[in-house]
Image: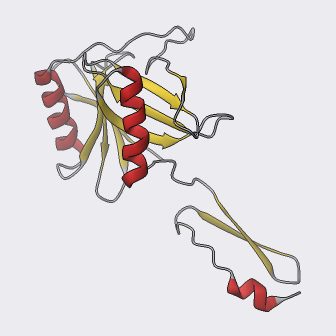
Amino acid sequence: MNTTKLRSKRVILSTTAAVVVALGAGGAVWATAANADPEVRGADRNRVGDAAVQAVGGGSVLDVETSDDAGEAYEVEVRKTDGTEVDVVLDKDLKVIGQPAADSDDDGDETPDRVLSDTERASAEKAALDSVGADGTVTQVEAGDEGEAAYEVDVRLPDNTEWDVELDAGFTVLTKTADN
């Protein structure tokens, strides 16, 4: 075994996402990224997000992630100018290959989100931030579609912990769950 060649290669992995498995008596080491972060950041996020916004005729990018589905490269969540939210699926060349509604019911029928007023959105954001940490960033606010929850808010804290917060119609916290 040429150990000089093995030592000259470097692999950089997230310390929280890496799984290292040593195999055999020869000491060969294999590393794979388990739970790799699918979120797209920086200039790539802007480029991919702009393509999705253009495809839906305007709006703002809420989230950009890489896709693990065959033939898909990116999944982009966009809030259109009318307040509805849609998912746009793009291939590696940023061509639209799918544009389902952001939510669908249990039968697979696409149902658009109820459009929230600016006041509703601001009140839901404040209530969610107050419940998990005012130094967090709200990444999504939408009308609730299950049970008593009138609003569903996603919050990311500076340590990258993500919280799902469900609120009732009076903006009282019903549940808050840390995402894994």
In this view of the protein, which residue sits in the foreground, 75 or 146?
Answer: 75
**Residue sitting at the far left:** 119
The percent coordinates of residue 10 (x first, y second) are 63, 79
Question: Residue 27 is drawn in which quadrant?
Answer: bottom right
Image quadrant holding the N terminus, namely bottom right
Mark yes or no: residue 17 visible: yes
In this view of the protein, which residue sits in the foreground, 87 or 132?
Answer: 87
**Residue at the image point whose x is 13% and y is 23% from the top:** 118
Question: Residue 155 is drawn in which quadrant?
Answer: top left
* Left-right relation of 135 to 178: left
Question: Residue 69 is drawn in which quadrant?
Answer: top right
Is residue 27 positioned above or below 176 on the image? below
**Residue at the image point whose x is 47% and y is 27% from the top:** 88
* Left-right relation of 48 to 26: left
In this view of the protein, which residue sits in the foreground, 78 or 48?
Answer: 48
* Left-right relation of 169 to 58: left
Mark yes or no: residue 152 visible: no
Is residue 124 positioned above or below 162 on the image? above
Is residue 21 positioned above or below 140 on the image? below
The percent coordinates of residue 126 (x first, y second) are 14, 36
